Image (tube, grey):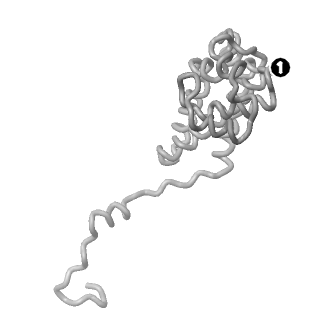
Amino acid sequence: MLKNQKPGKQPAKATPIEKKKLNKVSKPTLPVWQTWGIAIALFIVTLITFSNCFDNELTNWDDPDYIIENPLIRNLNSETIKEIFTKPYFGNYQPLHILSYAIEFQYFGLKNPGGYHKVSVVMFAISVMLLFYFILILTDNNLIMATATAVLYALNPMKVESVAWPQNARICYTPCFL
């Protein structure tokens, strides 16, 4: 019997929630340098993998409609931005996509199609990093699962089409598998 306990009175039992808290083993927090190091490595690997696409030209698939003949990207001002966000273009409502092309057009115009590919690859590499952190959160700091998922997403050959739309996907993606 405890010193301050009255005779005949049992100590209160823990509720199921309290038991869970007591039994839960807290995972150690990963060092920031480790997660940032992996995220930056994923970014660099993605850039290297898609670097052959930087010299590709514009294609005849949808580039004429989205870039070459698109009046919305020619002049970046408040009127065109309003139109980008209020009206569909080319049968799709993609305001961020068109706005990205409008900003890129101001820098690259039509003379530097590689710039469009570089921006696309950098945006994809950033999305790989974000996926890594998202999976890290979902898996309660499982570093192996988050890294493997991000690597598979980044190096999946099916991504070549959506990231750089090269004229020859095999040439663009070859260095990763040599």
Residue bearing the label numbered 1: 111
The N terminus appears in which quarter of the rendering? bottom left
> Which of these two is toward me, 49 or 70?
70
Query: Measured along the vertical axis of the image, is residue 121 above or below residue 7?
Result: above
Whole-percent x and y of residue 12? 25, 77
Q: Judge from the rendering whether residue 35 lies leftward or rightward of residue 77; answer left or right.
A: left
Query: Measured along the vertical axis of the image, is residue 137 above or below residue 3?
Result: above
The residue sitting at 31% across, 90% down in the picture is 3
Q: Judge from the rendering whether residue 167 lies leftward or rightward of residue 18; answer left or right.
A: right
Whole-percent x and y of residue 2? 29, 85
The C terminus appears in which quarter of the rendering? top right
Whole-percent x and y of residue 38? 65, 40
Query: Measured along the vertical axis of the image, is residue 50 above or below residue 17?
Result: above
- The local crowd at label 1, few if under 14, some if 14 to 19, many if 20 or more residues have their Cα within 10 Å, is few
- Say whether residue 45 is visible: no
Query: Measured along the vertical axis of the image, is residue 112 above or below residue 83?
Result: above
The residue sitting at 61% across, 28% down in the picture is 154
The residue sitting at 68% across, 33% down in the picture is 100
